Amino acid sequence: MTAVQQPTTPDLSWLESVSMSQLERNPYPTYERLRREAPLAFVPVLGSYVASTAEICREVATSPHFEAVITPAGGRTFGHPAIIGVNGDIHADLRGMVEPQLQPVEVDRWVDDLVRPIARRYLEAFEDAGRAELVGEYCEPVSVRSLGDLLGLQSVSSDQLRDWFHKLSRSFTNAGVDENGEFLDPEGFREGDEAKAEIRATVDPLIDRWIAEPAETAISHWLHDGMPPGQTREREYVYPTIYVYLLGAMQEPGHGLASTLVGLFSRPEQLEEVVDDPTLIPRAISEGMRWTSPIWSATARISTREVTVAGVDLPAGTPVILSYGAANHDTGRYDAPTEFDLHRPPLPHLAFGAGNHACAGIYYANQVMRIAMEELLEAIPNLERDTSEDVEFWGWGFRGPTSLHCTWEV
C-alpha cells in the first residue's frame, strides 16, 4: 500500500530576518518568495499579515468580511478620521466630500488649464540647459504644484509642498515594530509631526477665511459641501484627509510619471514610439504604474469575523496589508512582470487599489501624468537618460525613483 504523502507547511522562519531597510531598498525579492511560498503570511517586522498576489489583494479588498483599517504608522501620522482608514457613514461622508471635484466630467473641465501652464513653466527653467534631474526639477514639482493649486494652497511654494510630502512619507512608512508591537523607531515620526505643525500654521488661516467666504478651492468645498446652511465640517475632521492628500495625492502622479520615464528609457524603441505617437502616452503611463506602483504597500484591511483566505484561517480583528506593488508583479497574472513593456496586453492592474477604498483620484492623477508627459516629450523629444548616473528606486509603502538624470542636445 502506497503511503499518503502529507502536505508540507513551508518553513517561513526566514521572515524573522526581513528588515524595514530591506523592504525600503528592494522589496521585490521578499515578495517574490512570499508569492511562491506563502502569498498570505505574517511578516514580523510589519506586525501584520501581508497579501502579495493580485488574486488575494483583490479578494481581501472587495470582501464583505474585511473593512478598511489604517496601519499603525499611518494612524500615528494622519490621525482620525483619515479617508483611507475609515468605514461606514464616516467613509461615505469623506468620499462624498472629495469625489465631486474628481469626477471625470469635472476634471476635464479644468485639468488642462491647471496642469499645462505649470508643466511649461518648469520646462522653461531647464529645457535650454541640455540636462536636468527630472524627479526633482519636473516630475515632483508638477505633481505638487498642480494639487497644491487645486487645494487652494497657491501661497505655498512647490519646494515646501515637496518637503511636506517627503516628511509625511517617511513618517507613514516608519512601520517597523518589535515582537510587542512597539515601533522600532519612535523618533521616526518627528519629521511628520513637524510637517503637520507647519501645515496647520499655513492652512488654519485659509480655513478661517474659507469658512467665512467660501471659495473655488477643494478644501473650501470639503468644508461646505453637503452641510446644512450656515454649517461647515469641523477642521479637525477634515485635517487627516488633508494630510492624506498632501502625501499620497501629491506623491502618486509625480512618482508614477518618473517611473514611467525610467521604464521607457529601458526600452528605447518604445520611447521612440511614444515620442512619435503621443496617443500612446496613456498606455505607457498605465504600464509604468503597474511596473513600479507609486503607492506600493500603504493600505490595509482588517477582518470583521473569522475568515479563511488562501487557506489561512484569520481570526476576527486580523489586519492584512495589501501589497499592490507586489500584486502588479504577480507572475500568475503577468508575463515577465519585472520588465516594462508598452505592448503588454492591457490587463487591469492594482496601482490605484480595489474595492470601495480604491483611489478617488484615479482619473485626475492619470490626467496630470498624461499632460506632463505630453509637454515634456514635445519640448524635448530627444530626451535620453544620463547613464553615468544610476537610477535608484526607494520605498516600501510609497515607491519611486529618487532621481532621474537626463541629457539632450539643445
Image (cartoon, grey):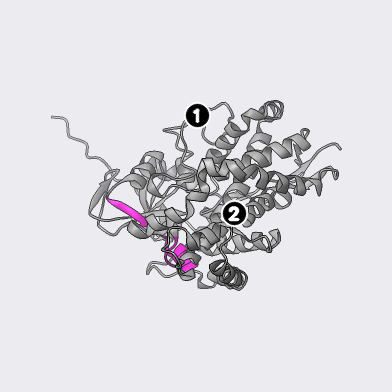
Residue 375: % across, % down: 72, 39
State the residue in front, 160 or 38: 160
Secondary structure under the numbered disc 2 in the rendered image: helix
- Tally of numbered discs: 2
The amino acid beneath tag 1 is: Pro
Residue drawn at 63 percent across, 33 percent down: 281
Q: Is residue 319 magenta?
A: no
Left or right: 324 in relation to 187: left
Label 1 secondary element: loop
Question: Considering depth in this image, is 83 or 31 the residue closer to the camera?
Answer: 83
Q: Position of residue 77 (x, y in %)?
A: 50, 66
Q: Quadrant of residue 192?
A: bottom right
> Residue sitting at 53 percent across and 27 percent down?
344
* Figure check: 235 above or below 378: below
- The front one of 202 and 260 is 202
Spatial CA span between label 2 and label 1: 26 Å
Mark 2 crowdedness (10 Å alpha carbons): few <14, some 14-19, many ≥20: many
Residue 225, percent across and down? 47, 58
Q: Residue 126 location, x and y as percent?
A: 81, 47
- 278 sits left or right of 324 in the view: right
Residue 278 position (above or below residue 395): above
Q: Nearer the viewer, mark 2 or mark 1?
A: 2
At horizontal 40% and vertical 41% (from top left) the residue drawn is 53
Which residue shows up at 68% across the image and 48% down it?
A: 139
Say which residue label 1 marks: 346
Circle 2 is placed at which residue position?
A: 250
Query: Magenta segment, which residues?
Result: 65-82
Quadrant containing the N terminus is top left
Q: Is residue 296 visible?
A: no
Taking 108 as reference, is 382 left or right?
Answer: right
User: Toward the viewer: 75 or 356?
Assistant: 356
